[in-house]
Image (cartoon, helix red, strand yellow):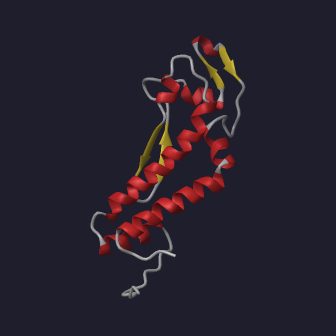
Amino acid sequence: MSEVLATIHVDGIKEMNKALKAVDKTAPTATRLALNSVAGFVIDKALPDVPTRTGAARRSWKAKSTRTSSRITYGGRGAEYMPWLDFGGRTGKKKSVKRDFIKEGRYLFPTVRKYRAEIAGFAEGSLKKVAQNAGLDVD
């Protein structure tokens, strides 16, 4: 039977990182990688809906994270038009190309809403693995 040496209460991700760092110095890096995998999970769900001609718009989606946050970026030099694809608006010479503007977007935000429960479960599982790998018992 395992013996409980300490109880760590976590109110948020910052507190979790601080608590994990006290137990394992590499845990904050593992937390960042876990959050990156959560963003990757969202990207995998959203990409099938993104239209493709050359594939640049799909390739532009990137998962980026820190120890306390996870985010998704897209567009950039290779696919400057990706935000236009997602939200719409006018572009081109004299704003001649029009795509209906949709405030909530077509791809990223609808995907997050649609898969909210799955994303939360995936994030919870990923962060639990980080804690377990640091040697903590997780409920």
Tell me, yes or no, if residue 80 can be seen here.
Answer: no
Q: On screen, 38 above or below 43?
A: below
Residue 46, by quadrant, is: top right
Residue furthest out toward the left? 25
Up/down of 137 relative to 100, above or below:
below
The residue drawn where x is 39% and y is 60% is 31
Where residue 54 sits in the image (x, y, percent)?
A: 51, 17
Q: Is residue 34 visible?
A: yes
Which x, y percent locates residue 37? Answer: 46, 49
Q: Position of residue 68 (x, y in %)?
A: 43, 59
**x 45%, y 29%: residue:** 76
Residue at image coords 51%, 22%: 55
Q: Position of residue 71 (x, y in %)?
A: 49, 47
Q: How many marks?
A: 0
Q: Quadrant of the N terminus?
A: bottom left
Q: Nearer the viewer, residue 55 or 97?
A: 55
Left or right: residue 126 versus residue 97 is left
Q: Is 80 situated above or below 34? A: above
7 to 129, vertically: above or below: below
Q: Is residue 85 left or right of residue 10?
A: right
Compare residues 132 and 95 and report the one nearer the observer: 132
Q: Does residue 10 appear to the left or right of 119 in the view shown? A: left
Residue furthest toward the front? 1
Foreground of the two, 42 or 129:
129
